[in-house]
Amino acid sequence: MGGIVRDADPSTATAALAASKAAFAELLGSLPGASAHERPGVRWVDTGLPDSVFNGVHDVAAEGFADSVALVRAHFAARGVPFHWETGLRPEPPDSDAILTGHGLRHVEDEPGMWLDLTRPRPAAPAVAGLSIRPVADDEALRDWVWTWGCGAPDEVTEPWYRAYSALPHGPGTALRMFVGYLGGRPAVTAYLFLAAGVAAVHYVVTRPEHRRLGLGTAMTATVLDEAVDAGRRVAVLTASPSGTGIYRRLGFRECCLVRTYEWGPPAG
């Protein structure tokens, strides 16, 4: 999709969300050791990282879908690298679920794709006492972001995340803008904004368990949306977790699709 998306409807928003995810996959393909792959009807990225979120398909045609699933699954199986596959963002055959699970992928979650017209007034987010939201502009803030996003995940899980994001171009003025919210001086909530495909994609609004139900997610999302408006975007898109859907609806987001995520990983041991 070229240029800024100026008007959206559910169909346009779904296409923009798909294009934004594809743009981020292409960014992941620039990581050291990563590789981008394209075959007739399918494109995917393999970063080599041991986490499915960093590896997966970002474009696939309905025609030849089963062959594409077999091809991609064989690629990652040979490499011993986990990957993910999302449906609901582009036309797929009606038996896509059976095809994916038949090739050993596991259905892990369903999330609504949502969109927001940034040119319309939004409800003001209630102020949260003691909350300070800062952009990730140095290594210390990036480690705070990863630690918070991980919500207690062990170092062997979060360290690959840190290495990946530290190698991506990010920071104020770039396409990838990450934010940490501090409560009482301690990192408590994260989000990131990805400016690509003519829209503002909001991802990883994550609050540490001990700080939930204080309005931090709403405050963080509102800050990121303000940043998107300042960057000239007119439409925001995202996929919503069950805990986040209510927040986004209160801010004016509307549903445009259902994104189903599948994962495959090498056998343990």
Image: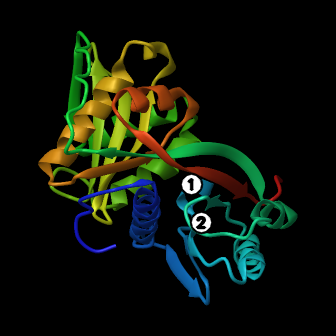
Residue at which label 2 appears: 56
- Where residue 157 sits in the image (x, y, percent)? 57, 44
| Residue displayed at 23% across by 70% down | 3
Real-space CA distance between mark 2 and mark 1, rounded to the nearest whole angstrom: 7 Å
Q: Residue 53 carries which label?
A: 1
Q: Are marks 2 and 1 in contact (CB under 8 Å)?
A: yes
Rendered view: 119 above or below 59: above
Mark 1 is surrounded, within 10 Å at the Cα level, by few (under 14), some (14 to 19) or many (20 or more) other residues, namely some
Residue farthest right in this picture:
102
| Residue displayed at 29% across by 25% down | 219
- Where residue 263 sits in the image (x, y, percent)? 70, 56
Front residue of this view, candidates 267 and 37: 37
Q: Quadrant of the N terminus?
A: bottom left
- Where residue 107 sits in the image (x, y, percent)? 75, 50
Residue farthest top in this picture:
129
| Residue displayed at 45% across by 54% down | 10
The picture quadrant where one finds residue 88 is bottom right
Residue farthest bottom in this picture:
40
Q: Identify residue type, mark 2.
A: Gly
Q: Horizontal placement of 19 versus 171: left or right?
A: right
Front residue of this view, candidates 229 and 106: 229
Residue 51 shows in this picture: no
Q: Horizontal placement of 197 versus 60: left or right?
A: left
Residue 211 shows in this picture: yes
Q: Identify residue type, mark 1.
A: Val
Q: What element carries label 2?
A: strand
Q: Is mark 1 on a helix, strand or loop?
A: helix
Q: Residue 97 carries which label?
A: none
Mark 2 is surrounded, within 10 Å at the Cα level, by few (under 14), some (14 to 19) or many (20 or more) other residues, namely many
- Where residue 166 sits in the image (x, y, percent)? 35, 54
